[in-house]
Image: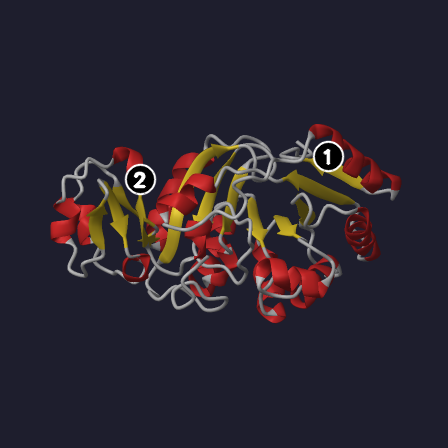
Amino acid sequence: MTTQSRIAPAGEPRQTEGGLIFDIQGHSVHDGPGTRTTVFMSGCPLQCVWCCNPEGLFRHPVMMYRESKCKCCGDCIRACPHGAARVVDGKLTHDRSLCDDCETFDCVTACLNEASVTSGRYYTQDELMRILLRDQQYWGKHGGVTFSGGEPLLQRSFITAVLAECKRHGMHVGVETTSCLPTDYYLDVMRSVDWVFTDIKHMDPAVHHRLTGQDNTLLLTNIARLAALPDWDGVIMPRIPIIPGLNDGTENLLATVRFIKSIGLDAVNILPFHRLGESKYRQLGRRYAFVDQSPPPDEHMAALKSLVTAEGVICLVGWETPF
């Protein structure tokens, strides 16, 4: 599904000046309390088979091709120095093994129809902070900034500096994290965070590895250690992405909820599977394995919520938040 040489389970993006960001969404109401600005950062230690942001798995900018905008004019073919693009049966095709390693994006520059575009660009700390300071006036009482991805904490030097600036300006800071990071660093960086969404995708280490490329030992350890910090007053909201047939069984759900209770937490967010990332796979020239998978019906989500609440744990469904 991915090019392993360019999408790796560890390491920061190749450029050290600035942070690699593939999207910034203002007025977001799904990524934490209140109205927020969500910053999507590139790179991830996991490779979840259902990932809805596959462009965020790359540790460098990547070309995405939008067929609906293509006029097959040939400008990109002539501009590409690698011979990666050609027309077959009237349609433009790409050798993604070449495209995914490209650093010049000549095809993007040549395409006047915006069929070929670049996902991901490097922002300096000052550039990003100007955007956040502009948006801050619209967040309201409960809002703030949420760093998502990918894994936003993977770009250590950049995110550490940005988080410090956010706190200096009195911003409420959220992160959506895998928690699959070195423990000492994870606990230290969380001191600049107020709200943590952290996925628990499966409680069985072997199944977790099959679904994400990594087992769950480190992330469960980190979540438990963060919950036990005596001098941190942030909120941890564990999340379970409900993927029908993969992790929505009663045994796994109850094991997850009981783990959450055992570390002193009292709430969980269950997120129903969706196919909103399907078009991105096409734009990256990759097969989407869940094209025939339907979202879980409302009745199923309600039944799962009942299982959770019967264990004495608050259950938020979908994009519900406490505010």
Q: Is residue 83 above or below residue 34?
A: below
Among the 4 quarters of the image, the one containing residue 26: top left
On screen, 169 above or below 157? above
Between 265 and 274, which is closer to the camera in this rendering?
A: 274
In the image, is residue 214 above or below residue 299? below
Question: Could you tell me if residue 41 is visible in this image?
Answer: no
Instruction: Locate residue 273 relative to residue 275 in the image: left or right.
Output: right
Instruction: State how far apart marks 1 and 2 are (Cα).
Output: 34 Å
Label 2 crowd bin: few (<14), some (14–19), many (20+), radius 10 Å: some
* Residue 146 at x, y percent in the picture: 52, 45
| Nearer the observer, 245 or 226 | 245
Which of the two residues, 304 or 168, is positioned nearer the viewer here?
304
In the rendering, which numbered label is found on residue 66?
Answer: 2
In the drawing, does residue 29 fall left or right of residue 106?
right
For the C terminus, the quadrant is top right
Q: Is residue 75 visible?
A: yes
User: Where residue 239 sits in the image (x, y, percent)?
Assistant: 67, 47
* Up/down of 299 relative to 116, above or below: above
Q: Residue at x 27, y 45 (%)?
A: 117
Instruction: Say which label, 1 or 2, has the lower sequence index.
Output: 2
Q: Residue beneath label 1, please?
A: 301
